[in-house]
Amino acid sequence: MKRIGTLLIFILVITTRATFAQTDTLSLTLRQAESFFLKNNYDLLASNYEIDRAKAEMITAKLFENPTLEYENLFYNHETRKFLQTSYANGQYAGSVSQLFKLAGKRNKNIKLAQTGVKLAEYEYFDLLRTLKFELVNTFYKAYFSAQSIKVYQEQINSTGQLLKAYDLQLKMGNVAAKDVIRIKSLLLNLRAEQAGLLNELEDNYKDLKLLCGLDAGASLVLIADQDAFQNEPIDKIPYGLLLDSARTNRADLKVAKTGLLYNERNLKLQKAMAIPDVEIALSYDLKDNYPEKYTGLGLKIPLPLFFRNQGEIKKAQIGIAAANTNIKKQETLLENEVFNSYKTALRNEKLYAETDPAFSTDFNTLISGLIKNFKARNISLIEFLDLYDAYKENTLQLNKLRFERMSARAELNYVTGSTIFK
């Protein structure tokens, strides 16, 4: 019975581990990654709070000033020797209610300024979204093609390991030289070392991807690329002028710069209005400390703008407008240069990719088995075999790199135009 119980516990543990292993492995497409990114990215969530903060400023701007209530009472009557008397015969009290009225449209100007602040926060959010989304797509494809290159290494490691076993056996039989076995061992060692370097790079990419998507650090990712994305419309069919117009229309950083100018212009109007004094109107009542007794009065309070006319804030707002105009010109120049450079890079990558043989990497196993077969038949020497082996590996790695750069260039065109030209 003890053995049966132990066996059941063992099976339960193994089943539980298998279940956790399945749970921790996440197959992830780019669309799924974008969905996780929009829901879980901490930078986006923090930026969204800034929008809420700006909206709270608008609530404050819409509020009116509170009225002010003043009251004064006789504290101690030394004649009657009593405190806080309010009767007409022996007491005295006075009170007033005042309200501040803002002139020169200060409230409306403040509301418009706060509304512009909300727009500014929204455009800053969309610019952050644009930047992080490009980073997400770029990291996804970098990780995906790194994983493809690692598969090539693993296939070569497996094939080389089988070859090494065969050569060790032939060495014991005295049919091959020891130096040939050493060369194969050296090749296997180099392949494993290079694969380890790629694995380290892949883990860094996975880490960045998990951070962007808000995924658990322990999740094991398996990236799945949409093959249709590799067959998008050729870039040379898209006019450069269309890309530039799209960037000028959609780029959030340019909208931030233009909204910054509007913010400073509205701030200047507000600061000029702040130079005009506000009026405070008060209604007051006094029991007997005024003439006539039971006095009621209407008061008006307004500061005289002899010295302070908000000169400093007006000057700062004027400087802000000049700086905002300069920033717009800078952003427009940056935009044009980025679109031009990205377009040229994308065209170059497309041309280079189009010149590659699409059937180059379709049948790795056939190529390797053919090489091994010819090598065993002594049709090629060990050095020729190793050279061909290395040439295939390098070309496959270069092809994966080219594929990544092609997809990265397309993602960058989306980034610099602020639109989704390539899905």
Image (cartoon, rainbow, N blue to C red):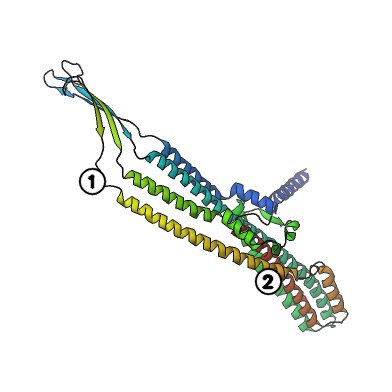
Residue that appears at 40% across and 55% down: 320
Residue that appears at 71% across and 56% down: 222
Residue sitting nearer the eye, 147 or 133: 133
Helix, strand or loop status at disc 1: loop
> Which residue appears farthest toward the right when viewing the image?
377
Q: Position of residue 249 (x, y in %)?
A: 58, 54
Query: In the figure, 76 relative to 42: above or below?
Result: above
Relative placement, left or right, of 206 versus 14 is: left
Query: In the figure, 190 relative to 322: above or below?
Result: below
Residue ID for mark 2:
194
Please tell me how crowded label 2 is: few (under 14), some (14-19), or many (20+) other residues with Cα within 10 Å: few
Relative placement, left or right, of 159 versus 94 is: right
Which is nearer the N-term, disc 1 or disc 2? 2
* Residue type (three-letter) at the residue carrying disc 1: Leu
* Residue 154 found in image quarter: bottom right
> Can residue 46 be seen in the rendering of this structure?
no
> Which residue appears farthest toward the left when viewing the image?
79
Query: In the figure, 194 relative to 73: above or below?
Result: below
The alpha-carbon separation of the residues under discs 1 and 2 comes to 78 Å
Query: In the figure, 277 relative to 233: above or below?
Result: above
* Residue type (three-letter) at the residue carrying disc 2: Glu
Relative placement, left or right, of 73 versus 313 is: left
Q: Position of residue 153 (x, y in %)?
A: 73, 69
Residue ID for mark 1:
306
Residue sitting nearer the eye, 173 or 313: 313
Please tell me how crowded label 1 is: few (under 14), some (14-19), or many (20+) other residues with Cα within 10 Å: few
Helix, strand or loop status at disc 2: helix
Q: Position of residue 350 (x, y in %)?
A: 70, 67
Q: Position of residue 80 (x, y in %)?
A: 13, 17
